Amino acid sequence: MSRVAIVFFLLVFNAFAQEYGYQIYRQYCASCHAEKLETGSDQSTIKAPPIDALTRQIKYFYRTKDKFTEYLVDYISDPSPEKSVCKPCIERWGVMPPVKDLTEEEKQSVALWMYKNFR
Ligand code: HEC
């Protein structure tokens, strides 16, 4: 493959993986996690921390894409208080239930979508 073709392939692949990650989020995470913290809305009734705030918190501990993905895939497969980067979340809601029925690749795409779309 020429270099141009490789760059093009990577761009398309990246966009595809992120779009795919968003679909996984809609299907498997959105029932509990809102995408964004809605300022001014009633925070006392939400079921789980919003994805934007979570991503910020995770990046504080796991800055690179690889570390971020590794942490995320592991946490959602087998959540525990020891692995948590948000102790107040655990105190408020208890540990989240493990996410079943997702392949390793699907978990990685949702991680990539979070990493790329939230700061
Ligand atoms: C049944 C509700 C529910 C579903 C579905 C769910 N979560 Fe959670 N999640 C929670 C709750 C409650 C917390 C806060 C407690 C905790 O941190 O474990 C949480 C916390 C988290 C955390 C923070 C972990 C930490 O370090 O404390 C991440 C990351 C996360 N969820 C990602 C996801 C992703 C990605 C999905 C979809 C693949 C998902 N969750 C699906 C309820 C859910």
Image (cartoon, rainbow, N blue to C red):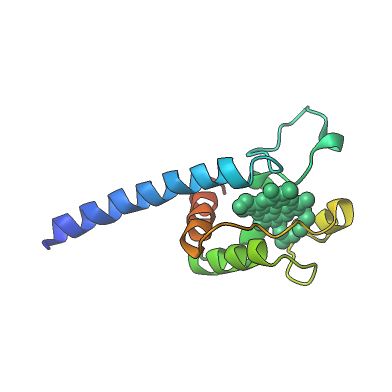
| Rendered position, 76 above or below 113 | below
Q: Most extreme residue toward the left, as rendered?
A: 2
Left or right of residue 30, residue 79 in this image: right
**How many numbered discs, if any?**
0
At x 71% / y 32%, what residue is drawn? 38
Residue 94 percent across, percent down from the top left: 85, 56
Left or right of residue 92, residue 110 in this image: left
Quarter location, residue 79: bottom right
Q: Most extreme residue toward the front, as rendered?
A: 101
At x 74% / y 57%, what residue is drawn? 97
Residue 108 percent across, percent down from the top left: 50, 60
Image quadrant for the N terminus?
bottom left
Left or right of residue 90, residue 34 in this image: left
Quarter location, residue 40: top right
| Rendered position, 83 above or below 87 | below
Q: Most extreme residue toward the top, as rendered?
A: 40
The answer to whether one can see residue 26 in this image is yes
At x 36% / y 52%, what residue is drawn? 14
Residue 2 percent across, percent down from the top left: 11, 61
Q: Nearer the viewer, residue 101 or 105?
A: 101
The answer to whether one can see residue 54 in this image is no
| Rendered position, 116 above or below 77 | above
Left or right of residue 76, residue 8 in this image: left
Residue 104 percent across, percent down from the top left: 50, 64
